[in-house]
Image (cartoon, rainbow, N blue to C red):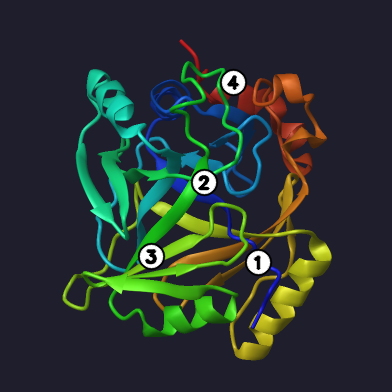
């Protein structure tokens, strides 16, 4: 069993409109935009990162806003819900805030003894806020939301799978332990993790496969301390039979990817070097940063991308 993985690093999804996406996360959710860059494979498309003050692993939601992308169709083989942690007693505030901004899909429930508020993102993305007693992570409070209510980071992701058995086994190999199973949902946690250390598996054998599009999660990334730990994880996964990519330099972290038995794309990302490697902490997410291999295209890229702010 692996012991290098500490929890979630980031979650990356797809959107249809960059400006709408930016406004939702920085205004409605009060997160900090910690990086404004472009997709490595499609440099004419933004890659936007939102999180806490530094973009700490376990807090960062990222998006590829592809103009004119078709809406995704929910189903199996995907992350269905991305869940953020907020302090106990904060859901009433969030219900009023999101309703005032006409956010759809608002409903409350309780799972594994924790109160949740579900809501939809601009493209129908599945989100929830969960009240957590002991989350000591420091929130970003310059987005209009005070410390008593602000998002701390991720709590978990929930995967919808036709058969959860092999993914359960994989997560066990990755250091996760079964916490509880209730109402058809299996919760696994990484003991001593980074706060973003829970994964839910919902087995749905009679549900058709999802279709990726706007509002869909592209991949979920798990955090390791450094490149040495990442190489250990990569070797162990390959030895177990998984097809894992070589290490890829993503400027702000190093990444490896592999497809899980349930169809969800997993990434293992390093905590280093971080989002402040090319911007001062006070100005994270302000300037357009372009990967080195695309820097010669800067003029054309800047002309093509629409401004994020009106």
Cα gap from disc 4 to disc 2, whole angstroms: 46 Å
Left/right placement of residue 297 relative to residue 260 reads right
| Circles 3 and 4 in contact, beta carbons < 8 Å | no
Disc ID at residue 303: 4
Disc ID at residue 200: 3
- Residue at the spot x=32%, y=25% of the render? 93
Q: Quadrant of the N terminus?
A: bottom right
- Residue at the spot x=74%, y=67% of the render? 230
Q: Using the image, determine if residue 36 lies above or below residue 246.
A: above
- Residue at the spot x=30%, y=46% of the render? 115
Quarter of image, res 281: top right
Disc ID at residue 134: 2
| Mark 3 Cα-neighbour bin, 10 Å: few <14, some 14–19, many ≥20 | many
Cα gap from disc 3 to disc 4, whole angstroms: 42 Å
Mark 2 or 3 closer to N-term? 2
The picture places residue 222, in percent across and down from the top left corner, at 60, 61
Q: Nearer the viewer, residue 238 or 107?
A: 107
Cα gap from disc 2 to disc 3, whole angstroms: 20 Å
Left/right placement of residue 191 relative to residue 218 reads right
Mark 1 sits on what residue? 5
């Amino acid at each position: 069993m692996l012991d290098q993985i500490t929890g979630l690093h980031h979650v990356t999804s797809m959107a249809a409109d960059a400006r709408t996406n930016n406004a939702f996360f920085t205004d409605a959710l009060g997160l900090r935009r910690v990086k404004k860059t472009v997709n490595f494979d499609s440099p004419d498309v933004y890659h936007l990162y939102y999180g806490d003050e530094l973009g700490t692993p376990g807090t960062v939601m990222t998006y590829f806003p592809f103009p004119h992308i078709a809406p995704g169709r929910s189903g199996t083989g995907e992350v269905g819900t991305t869940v953020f942690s907020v302090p106990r007693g904060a859901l009433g505030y969030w219900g009023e805030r999101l309703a005032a901004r006409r956010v759809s899909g608002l409903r409350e429930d309780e799972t594994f003894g924790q109160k949740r508020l579900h809501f939809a993102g601009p493209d129908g993305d599945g989100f929830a806020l969960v009240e957590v007693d002991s989350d000591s992570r420091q929130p970003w409070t310059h987005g209009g939301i005070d410390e008593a209510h602000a998002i701390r980071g991720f709590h978990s992701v929930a995967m919808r799978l036709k058969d959860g058995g092999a993914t359960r086994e994989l997560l066990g190999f990755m250091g996760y332990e079964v916490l509880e199973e209730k109402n058809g949902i299996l919760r696994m946690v990484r003991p001593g993790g980074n706060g973003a250390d829970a994964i839910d598996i919902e087995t749905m054998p009679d549900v058709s496969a999802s279709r990726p599009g706007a509002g869909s999660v592209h991949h979920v990334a798990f955090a390791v301390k450094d490149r040495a730990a990442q190489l250990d994880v990569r070797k162990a996964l390959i030895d177990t039979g998984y097809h894992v990519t070589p290490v890829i330099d993503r400027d702000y972290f190093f990444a490896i990817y592999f497809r899980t038995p349930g169809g969800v794309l997993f990434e293992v990302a390093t905590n280093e070097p971080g989002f402040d490697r090319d911007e001062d902490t006070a100005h994270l997410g302000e300037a357009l940063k372009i990967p080195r291999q695309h820097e010669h295209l800067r003029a054309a890229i800047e002309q093509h991308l629409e401004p994020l702010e009106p």
